[in-house]
Amino acid sequence: MTSADMTQAESLPDNLDQLLSSNGIRLGAAQRRRLAWLAQRLGGTTIHQSGSVPAPDSHVVIVVEPPSGPAAEMLYRSLRANSAVVIPFGENPAFDFLKSKLTDFGTIGPSLDGPHEMWWGGLNWRAIVPDGGSRTSTPLRVVSCYPRACGHDQARRLRDKLAEFEIASDIAPIETVDGEHIRASERTAFMLRMWHEHREPLLFIEADATLSEPPRLPSCLDCDIALHRWNRWEMSARTLFLGRSPAAEALLQTWHHIASAYPQVWEGYLLDQAWSLTSSQVPLDTVWLPRSYHAPAEDLGTPRHTAVVHNLPVDSSDLGPDAEFGMAMRTARRASRSGGRDSMIVVKSETMASDVITVIMRDIATSDAREVAASIEAVTEAFAADCGGFGRLELSLCSWQDDVRTAKSAARSANNRIIEIAPWQTLPTDLFRTVGQSRNAGSVVVMAGHRG
């Protein structure tokens, strides 16, 4: 690194903090770290101004207001190959159209110090990691398992390639209830065992896959979890990276718990639910791996620099067994965010209580993005200041009445207290204390008020 590069890296935190604070943007520590990571790799950072195009030296563009269709098109056409777009209020569905025009790189869940989902994306992965991936000192261990009934040859090609690339691995047969089929609970039990036996980050690869080149990308990303989403919404566990972090371990444990409770449910859906639960409770740093890490063997469109080739038919029938499965979450997952039927953020209080309060924020689709963001911050700050005796806050964002009804039904089934608010309403500082004085589980407190 040159002296000029070192000076830029040293001044970067102060410059970013000034840029964020002057534009009223709150980021959690993990989100702030990812933004700095992008700025160090790509260069200048700027706030996108509506109706304008980024300056030539602006390679990291922060978008805080949802652009209209024409404005999104203009922004998209102005981006260069070495550009990235960061949306600090990524939980808002108003940004979905812009996201749909870009390649999803990753998302980082909310936390009390940054109660928003941060999304980042761009045009292609080559801007973030050059051809062949960056060399890294971070060790990585590939792990895999296969049914004992399938025999040793099930993983022969993968073993051979790992030996050729001199990559440490642990590939083992396991006992399975269904013969040659591995249940999600059996897969996650194996991965938990690998997590405790090894200290390196783990890259799980399906045993019947093979490698075309060393899979360097995941270990370059400094993330909690990295995986591929087929058709941008269907989470696949065939290639799954887990960094050595408490958040990654929490996701793995949650996935195993859900898979054990529902052994007959398709594992992609179970992984999706584990991701949603974990990312609402901790700032889970997720990276969406490119197609080159999940290429079907017969895919004529396989990229030149394919890393992981899976023994999959081109129609992806080995993924979702039901074409209608997960319909309710597809729109949200295509935009890398939680849906209205999920809790966007879960905040625990210091009170040793089992009572839970659900806050449903309605009319998200018809509200200003800054208004929604400010309301989310107001709710979490009020709960942190005075939890009203509740042990946990669950906040759901609902665009439509159908989402509101579903969120209420879920809260009632859990015997939660419920508050329904709109983004433009001013909340009292003792909101949760007041509601907590009436402990009628399942009842709804609707905040009064009209848009000014």
Image: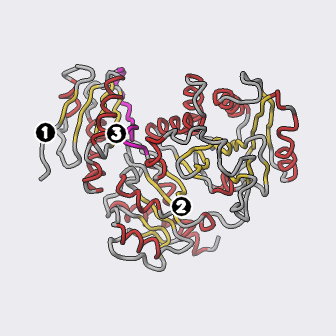
* Location of residue 138 in the rendering, given as x and y in whole percent from the top left corner: 70, 51
Q: Is residue 41 magenta?
A: no
SS class, disc 3: strand
Residue type at tag 2: Thr
Crowd class of label 2 (few under 14; some 14 to 19; many from 20; radius 10 Å): some
Give 435 or 326, whichever is nearer the viewer. Answer: 326
Q: Secondary structure at mark 2?
A: strand
Q: CA distance from mark 1 to mark 3?
A: 18 Å
**Prevailing secondary structure of the magenta residues:** loop
Q: Residue at x 23, y 47 (%)?
A: 423
Residue at the image point whose x is 70% and y is 54% from the top = 295
Neighbourhood count class around disc 1 (C-alpha, 10 Å): few under 14, some 14–19, many 20 upward: few
Disc 3 marks which amino acid?
A: Ser
* Label 3 Cα neighbours within 10 Å, binned few <14 / some 14-19 / many ≥20: many
The tag earlier along the polypeptide, 1 or 3, is 3
Against 20, residue 322 (above or below) is above
Q: Is residue 57 left or right of residue 300?
A: left
Q: CA distance from mark 3 to mark 2?
A: 26 Å
Q: Residues in magenta?
A: 338-354
The residue that mark 1 highlights is 448
Q: Which mark is residue 103?
A: 2
> Residue 167 appears at what percent x and percent y?
81, 48
